[in-house]
């Protein structure tokens, strides 16, 4: 299984290829992450590259420690919540 840090690295690599004005690297996790200690430095690396790193924690687990995180219980909540959350992150209110 991939950790939140591994997933965030992949998301960052994909976002770095983008030429969009607002680049957002989104990774999803179940929140049971053994590599939370790596996420602050990955978040800073993303910010230095002009990328917003966002953790989406599914299944009712706590999003604490995940950058710009949003919690979703299931796919339906994800669909109705994440778009609004990403807009807030880009505006600096996430």
Image (tube, helix red, strand yellow):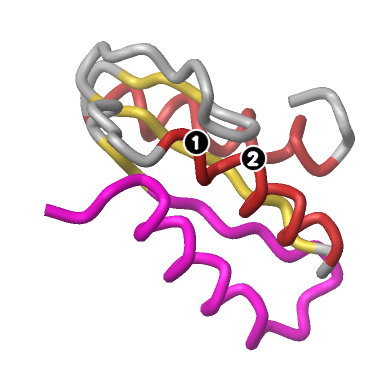
Query: Does 20 lie within the magenta span?
Result: yes
Real-space CA distance between mark 1 and mark 2, rounded to the nearest whole angstrom: 7 Å
Query: Does 17 lie within the magenta span?
Result: yes
Q: In screen coordinates, is 16 left or right of 47?
A: left
> Crowdedness of circle 2 by 10 Å Cα count: few (<14), some, many (20+)?
some
Numbered circle sitting on residue 37: 1
Residue placed most toward the observer, 31 or 91: 31
Q: How many marks?
A: 2
Residue 69 found in image quarter: top right
Quarter placement of the C terminus:
top right
What element does badge 2 sit on?
helix
- Which residue is found at the position 46% from the left and 56% from the top? 8
- Which residue is found at the position 82% from the left and 69% from the top? 49
Numbered circle sitting on residue 49: none
- Above or below residue 70? Residue 53 is below
Do the numbered discs 1 and 2 sit on residues whose CB atoms are within 8 Å? yes
Q: Position of residue 32 (x, y in %)?
A: 23, 27
Residue 21 found in image quarter: bottom right
> Over which residues does the magenta segment extend?
1-27
Q: Position of residue 17 (x, y in %)?
A: 64, 87
Residue that sits furthest to the left in the current view: 1
- Which residue is found at the position 36% from the left and 45% from the top? 4
What element does badge 1 sit on?
helix
Q: In screen coordinates, is 79 left or right of 30?
A: right
- Above or below residue 21? Residue 7 is above
Numbered circle sitting on residue 40: 2
> Crowdedness of circle 1 by 10 Å Cα count: few (<14), some, many (20+)?
few
Residue placed most toward the observer, 31 or 76: 31
Q: Position of residue 52 (x, y in %)?
A: 72, 52
């Amino acid at each position: 299984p991939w950790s939140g840090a591994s997933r965030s690295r992949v998301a960052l690599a994909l976002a770095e290829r983008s030429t969009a004005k607002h680049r957002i690297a989104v990774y999803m996790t179940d929140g049971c992450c053994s590599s939370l200690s790596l996420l602050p430095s990955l978040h800073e690396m993303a910010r230095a590259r002009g990328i917003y790193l966002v953790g989406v924690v599914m299944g009712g687990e706590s999003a604490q420690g995940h950058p710009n995180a949003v919690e979703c219980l299931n796919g339906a909540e994800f669909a109705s919540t994440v778009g609004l959350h990403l807009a807030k992150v880009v505006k600096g209110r996430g």
